[in-house]
Amino acid sequence: MRWQSRRWAVTSALVLVAVTATTFADTPVSQARAAKIQLTPQQEAGQRVVYSYPGLTVPQSLLTAIQNGQAAGVIFFKENISSPTQISGVIQQLARAQQQSPVQAPLLLMTDQEGGQVRRLPGAPELSEKEIGASSNGPTLATQAGTGAGDNLRGVGMNLNLAPVLDVYRTAGDFMDQYGRSYSMNATTCGNLGRNFISAQQAVKVAATAKHFPGIGSATTNQNTDARPVTLNVPLSTLRSVDEAPYGQAIGAGVKLVMTSWAVYPSLDANRPAGLSSTIVQQELRGRLGFSGVTITDAIEAGALQAYGTTGQRSVLAAQAGMDLILASARDVSQGQAATTALANALQSGQLDQAAFTASLNRINALRSSLG
């Protein structure tokens, strides 16, 4: 929900690593790596973690993690960006580090470029989702926003946008509406406009992320999962007919990723937040709605998870629930390292199933290879 501002010989898997059409994919070294590469548990684990860092300069520890094949990608915030030229230079630096990785697929380089108040890069899309939804020309504006966001990110070297928001807000001024982050109080409108945004953005080869499944549009003004635990007592019939409805259209449009919420939904699972619930991730999202792409958590440091232990413990719980990517977005490289180590240890101990782990890696690698 972040709008301010996861016995080596026994458990290692053979992961098919594709060489992709990036600027470095045609070198002899990368061609030699275009085969089945046996990754260590630490490397396998790192391929499920998205890192973040503070300030404008990439820490050497992050570059080392990338070079060692222990990072899936990086999320950028406003504090990381002073200008398009500056962030382009950073991304080139990250790409050079990735050239040395045993995993020759593009890093997932992402930000939140929703529009309106939630933009990390200057420029498109300038309209908020609320402004688009309120317009009589909404479908065209949503398409233009998707193209604009994609061109903007692609122009600096990013390949993934944590947008659009598909939450269906309920009351004027409630949590999603107060920042203009929801298209509409009407589920069909949210689905239609979200679909247009997704299709247009992905047409320019920037992956879209539908969020925050199964929907936080019913959250009141102060129900912010970044800060505290949130329970949304929405009847199952409403949750499916209203909150989840836009995801059917997003999935139909081929959305590459879905981000889950950290709220608890008693009508589906009274015991776990959505991103830690196999009922919600595996049965509802993948089973009922048929999503076969990549799942990504919201911020693993969120206050909503205060009862679920350390970064490492939370990351393992999320992986057990079926989340593919762990978003370590506290602007601290050690957070991503902690998630990676915990996932590796859980894989080696059998706490995480190797077959399920490999299936996640394959989904992630297919996504990365598609964005070259």
Image (tube, rainbow, N blue to C red):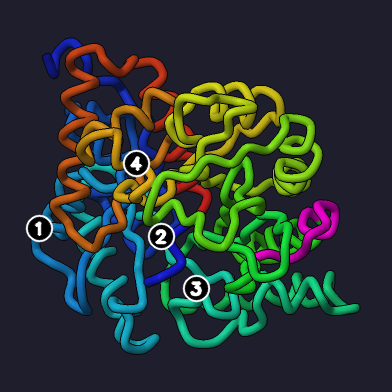
Residue 265, above or below 4: above
**Is the residue under label 1 in contact with that under label 3 (CB below 8 Å)?**
no
Mark 3 or 2: the one toward you: 3
Earlier sequence position, callout 2 versus callout 4: 2
Q: For residue 355, what is the image quadrant?
A: top left
Q: For residue 352, what is the image quadrant?
A: top left
**Disc number at residue 254?**
none
| Total numbered badges shown on the rendered structure | 4
Residue 277 position, x and y percent, is 48, 27
Q: Which residue is mark 1?
A: 61
Please tell me whether mark 1 sits on a helix, a strand or a loop: helix
Neighbor class of circle 3 (other Cα within 10 Å; few <14, some 14-19, many 20+) is many
Q: Is residue 85 left or right of residue 335?
A: right
Residue at position x 75%, y 48% in the image: 246
Q: Nearer the viewer, residue 147 or 246?
A: 246
Earlier sequence position, callout 2 versus callout 1: 2
Q: Which residue is mark 4?
A: 305
Q: Is residue 203 visible?
A: yes
Residue at position x 62%, y 68% in the image: 181
Residue type indicated by callout 1: Ser
Earlier sequence position, callout 4 versus callout 1: 1
The furthest residue to the right: 136
Q: Which residues are magenta?
A: 182-191
Q: Is residue 32 visible?
A: no
Residue type indicated by callout 4: Leu
Q: Which residue is mark 2?
A: 22
